[in-house]
Amino acid sequence: MSERGERLCELARAATVHLLSAEDDGRPLWGSGFFVAPGWVLTAAHVLRQHLAADPSVPFRVRAPGIDAEACLERWLLTEPSRPTVPPEEDLALVRLADVPGRHPHECVWLADRAGRHSGPLKACGYHPGPPETHFRIVDAEINGHEDTYGLIIKPDIDLPSGVSGGPLVDPDSGAVVGLIKSRRRQQDGGKAVAISALRRFGKTYREVMAAHDRWHGDEPMSPAGDNWIDLQGTPVADSGECWTPADRREALRLLAELPPPPDAPTVELLAKKARSSNLWPDGTPDLLTWRDGTGLLYEGGRPLEALTFLRYLKGVEKYTRARGGDCEALAGWIDKRLRKEPRRPMHDFVREVALPDALRPVPGERARRRVISYPGPGEGPTVAVLLDPVIGAQSPRFFWQLWYDDGEGQPTLYEADGSVHGFRPEGLVQVLREPLGRLLRAKDHDGRPVPLEVALPSVYFDTAVHRWRFDDIAQLNDTGHLGARRRVVLRALERRGEPDKLWSDRWQTMAGLRRFGSWRTLAEQAVPGSRDHRNAEGYRIPVMCRPAGRDPGRTAMRRALDNGHGVAFWHIEGHSSRACPESCDTLYAKVEELVCSVTSLAEIPDRLRHVRQDISDHEADCAWAEPVALMYDDPRRPLPPEEAEPLDAPL
């Protein structure tokens, strides 16, 4: 091992701990862990599960040379502690020392800003129970495969000792901890690990921990041997000012940790994209919860882009923070100081003249609170789509689901798909979609500008109350958590997936050019307008039905609307069964007429309806008419992904 490698291993040793019972009664250690910030230990959730499943508040001990402290579980990612095996994305736990900060000085590992998964050689660290006594072990290991989103496969010929689960995996090339040891393979060598990027799944707690991590490293702490992690990162190069160095990264992350956190992931993504002159990064976009996560997008492979790119991103963060009244004088001063080291003077304006993207400029006061957000067309912003494919041959309605993300700039991408065998009944969809769809929406929502949600399913199932779905079991008293009150939620016809037909495209083009609209009461008692009536209807007329779309006469009316190119429609998902319309139908038609007459463009309609749904949630009077109303907003310019080659059949 090189001298640099040995020094790195000594730092890892100083930061690694083992966990054991609070009684200190001679029972073996539970497993290993490591300090990621002052007072914060990261370990594997399964290391704690068997001891804390019954009562997660039970205290235990964290021990290493010079440290013997009481600790408690702060959070783990386990959703079902009784599950026999723990998936990689849930096998993390954050532990916090119970004593006052600073009472137990200790080393902290360095965690990179990049979210990429490691491949290749590394060092596996942890504690082994003996005999004769617990002692630190470090072994050579190698990652030669990946599993799911966060899993790492450790090469089979690696012999991991018992007790090291929860310990750190150190990359000797980058000088950073890139993963956490999950398990050995039973009755054979090798094992599994969890990529350190899974730490982001802790959400707000991740923000707190990483801010403490960056402040601690930013103070340039030295180990007893006189080392720190930053000085041992990468191959030393002559600092010409053009390269982004580990020292630059440390100082930038320290300054970013002092700022208010970003409001949402798209804000970070937009600023990183602008810093890269709109040249996208490879391998998709990871979760972006902090400003430091944005710097992790400014790499090609494992190498940082030039310093000007990072300084452009920092300048964007500075301007965003300043525009919202935040204190960023320290960051601004350091950007200017660092820019003076960059030798290419003519390119300094590339940093100084950074302007905020239009979407990130603050909107003043009242206009921000109730402004109408236009629904995005092609090139105008992102959408999230849930595609619900009915299971062919099922005795009762069941669906397979897919989640798609469309950034508006190109083809939509599949985010996650149903892996079940039998699909799900309509009433079970909310529960199964809660975690993956909630995660996708949180990743793409702008502050005050939630991404629209499109739910595509066959029109005979258009009465599925998707606008009533809620993902939060616990919410504030004034926040019901219903999707339709939070964001623009629209339905799309799954039978229209793929290339749009001419009738549909032509009618949409006509409507997109109009500045006034009116409603069209398409059901007069039991009568349904014919196909010719639907085809010849003026472009400004939007079909409205006081009956459900899933049973006649509403089903026939919806079918004719779709067949004849209508892309927008309102209907009552419960409706009435009587032949004659009650008085409530007159209210419905009058209110929809009022709504569509208030818009000046087709793209305003979904958000106008969201405002009404929000008023229902706020218990505003005179809005109850909209509670059972659904909206189809089916834009042919952004077609749904085409159907799979093979049908989704019910299993035998």
Image: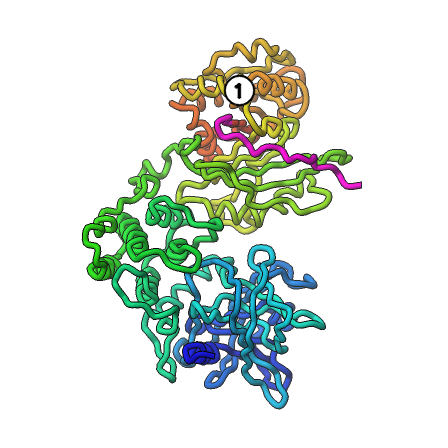
Q: Quadrant of residue 53?
A: bottom right
Q: Which residues are magenta?
A: 635-652
Residue sitting farthest toward the right: 652
In this rendering, position of residue 125 left or right of residue 260: right
Q: Is residue 367 above or below residue 247?
A: above
Q: Can the viewer see residue 106? A: no
Task: From the viewer's perspective, tell me whether residue 348 is left or right of residue 600.
Answer: left
Q: Where does the image place residue 268, in percent across and percent down from the top left?
A: 38, 50
Residue at horizontal 42%, vertical 21%?
512
Number of dots carrying numbers: 1
368 versus 195 height, above or below: above
| Image coords of residue 315 (percent x, y) | 27, 52
Q: Secondary structure at mark 1?
A: helix
Residue under the point 46% across and 61% down? 206
Residue 612 visible to the viewer: yes
In depth, the one of 204 and 216 nearer the eye is: 216
Q: Amino acid at mark 1?
A: Trp
On the picture, is 636 further left or further right than 268?
right
For the stretch drawn in magenta, what is the main secondary structure? loop
- According to the picture, the residue beneath numbered tag 1 turns out to be 504
Task: Indicate the quadrant containing the C terminus: top left, top right, bottom left or bottom right.
Answer: top right
Establish if 444 lies above or below 380.
Answer: below
Image point (44%, 53%), residue name: 288
- Nearest the viewer among 614 and 78 is 78
